[in-house]
């Protein structure tokens, strides 16, 4: 079975600064997807960024980028130029490449962006 | 496009009762997954429905059951409610096809069991 660990329950960052959220996972699969989801107080889960394990290039989406280290089973999220609207719970998630497309989520990191 | 919708928003029940939660998928989506998110935790996969059948199931007891209708909407039923069933229940929809299909989440139903 797959597991996802997020070792930082809470983090804070000043507006316009950069912050990195950590995620490690455990799997015996060779091909899979990794995700970062954001859950603001409105509760709706929003996809931030996705990485396919067979791609060596790290994914980027505007101010969001990942550092994917497959051998180390590490998948960190870097948020640049943090904005007040980035305040939310952030969940790291794993999905097998073949197998019905259900997520395994980590416990989450609460990020607060301070003015 | 209304996206994924869920009803009701909030629900309060007592132990031993039964509850039904509803989900309407995003337009064009035919697959619905349900997740339970306990307070302060990440969501846990309950089950997934496709073509009106349960296709996959997580580690949840038989008290949790579901249904998918011909219009792809879905219900989650929980019988004999326990205090530990108090959680946010999330529905996610996607379009079934080969490869990765982005899942879109609804806003959830907050269930409180007293």
Image (spheres, rainbow, N blue to C red):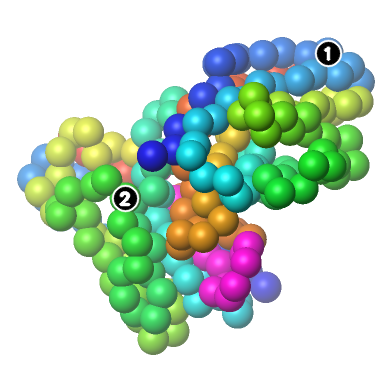
Q: Say which mark, if any, is on residue B58.
A: 2
Q: Is residue A51 magenta?
A: no
Foreground: B74 or A103? A103
A31 versus B49 height, above or below: above
In percent of width and height, residue A38 lies at 65, 38
The image position of residue A80, as x and y in percent, is 88, 26
Magenta segment: does it hold B95? yes
**Residue B12 to residue B26: above or below:** above
Disc 2 is placed on an element classified as loop
**Residue in front for this viewpoint, B35 or A54:** A54
Chain for mark 1?
A
Residue B24 at x, y percent in the picture:
47, 70
In 3D space, how far apart are the residues under numbered discs 1 and 2 (Cα atoms)?
Answer: 39 Å
Give me the chain letter of mark 2.
B
Question: Which span of residues is magenta-colored?
Answer: B88-101
Give the foreground label among 1 and 2.
2
Residue at disc 1, secondary structure: strand
| Residue A41 located left or right of residue B68 | right
Q: Quadrant of residue B37?
A: top left
Residue B62 appearing in the image: yes
Q: Position of residue A45 (x, y in %)?
A: 59, 46
Residue depicted at x 31% and y 75%:
B53
The residue under label 1 is A14
Quarter of the image with the N terminus of chain A is top left
For mark 2, does the 10 Å Cα neighbourhood hold few (<14), some (14 to 19), or many (20 or more) residues?
Answer: few
Please indicate whether residue B15 sits to the left or right of residue A71 in the image: left
Residue B83 position by quadrant: top left
Task: Specify the quadrant that holds the C terminus of chain A.
Answer: top right
Q: Residues within 10 Å of mark 1 (few under 14, many from 20)?
A: some
């Amino acid at each position: 079975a797959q597991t996802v660990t997020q070792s930082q329950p809470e983090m804070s960052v000043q507006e316009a600064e950069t912050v990195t959220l950590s995620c490690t996972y455990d799997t015996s699969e060779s091909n899979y997807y990794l995700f970062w989801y954001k859950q603001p107080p409105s509760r709706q889960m929003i996809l931030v960024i996705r990485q396919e394990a067979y791609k060596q290039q790290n994914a980027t989406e505007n101010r969001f980028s990942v550092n994917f280290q497959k051998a180390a089973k590490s998948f960190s999220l870097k948020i640049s130029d943090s904005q007040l609207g980035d305040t939310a719970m952030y969940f790291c998630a794993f999905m097998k490449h073949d197998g019905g497309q259900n997520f395994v989520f980590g416990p989450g990191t609460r990020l607060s962006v301070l003015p | 496009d209304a996206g994924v919708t869920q009803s009701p928003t909030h629900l309060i029940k007592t132990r031993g009762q039964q509850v039904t939660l509803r989900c309407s998928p995003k337009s064009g989506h035919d697959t619905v997954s349900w997740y339970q998110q306990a307070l302060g935790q990440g969501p846990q996969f309950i089950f997934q429905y496709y073509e009106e059948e349960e296709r996959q199931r997580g580690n949840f007891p038989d008290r949790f059951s579901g249904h998918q209708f011909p219009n792809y909407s879905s219900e989650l039923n929980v019988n004999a409610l326990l205090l530990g069933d108090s959680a946010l229940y999330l529905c996610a929809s996607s379009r079934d096809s080969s490869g990765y299909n982005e899942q879109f989440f609804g806003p959830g139903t907050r269930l409180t069991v007293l």
